[in-house]
Amino acid sequence: MIPPRVRRRRATDLDGCVAALAEVHRVDGYPMNWPTDPHRWLCEPRPARAWVAVTPDAAIVGHVAVHRLSGPARPTAEVARLFVAPAARGLALGDALLARARQWADERATDLVLEVAVRDAAAVALYERTGWRCTGTRTAPWTAPDGGPVSLRTFTAPARPAPGGY
């Protein structure tokens, strides 16, 4: 079996992304609140870059985006909209998508951060397994489908190696 490959997202990929996202939402409840316009949700805020995992037959089975943040003293971007279709799990696509976002950030000397719902144990495990560091928790500015508060964990990407490998 030829594994999926990660490449830059194209406008023509959005229907496939929404189809994969719908399956992720059905199985995992991500996103917690289904967006009114999922195509728009995938493109907001305007990403600096987005990538997809694509099977040899052109099916979209994963997605990740990075959004530049304003305000921090150092250039910083947020990893967002990361998901892998249930049928493609176990192929290390979450790791591959995160690695691609990390490569993009490293090429631009940009720090990466992300937020994840505390209840999303699989995502938290992925971030911790790949070296991300939890830097705090906060209550989301939006609510769960039942109207209750949502606790978020904030993560920072592992430090880049110093030039020269030290």
Image: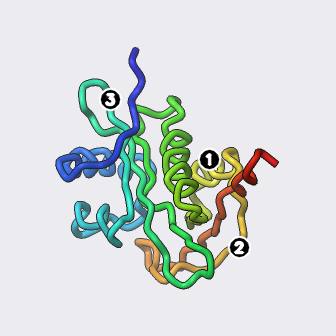
Q: Earlier in the sequence, mark 1 or mark 2?
A: 1
Vertical placement of residue 47 versus 16, above or below: below
Residue at the disc numbered 3 = 55
- Horizontally, residue 121 falls left or right of residue 133, namely left
Measured in 3D between alpha carbons, the distance from the residue under mark 2 to the one under mark 3, in whole angstroms, is 36 Å
Q: Quadrant of residue 39?
A: bottom left
Vertical placement of residue 54 versus 69, above or below: above
Residue at the disc numbered 1 = 126
Q: Quadrant of residue 116?
A: bottom right
The disc labelled 1 sits on which kind of residue? Leu
Measured in 3D between alpha carbons, the distance from the residue under mark 1 to the one under mark 2, in whole angstroms, is 17 Å
Residue at (59%, 71%) from the top-left corner?
A: 152
Q: Earlier in the sequence, mark 1 or mark 3?
A: 3
* Secondary structure under the numbered disc 3 in the rendered image: loop
Residue 22: % across, % down: 30, 50
* Secondary structure under the numbered disc 2 in the rendered image: strand
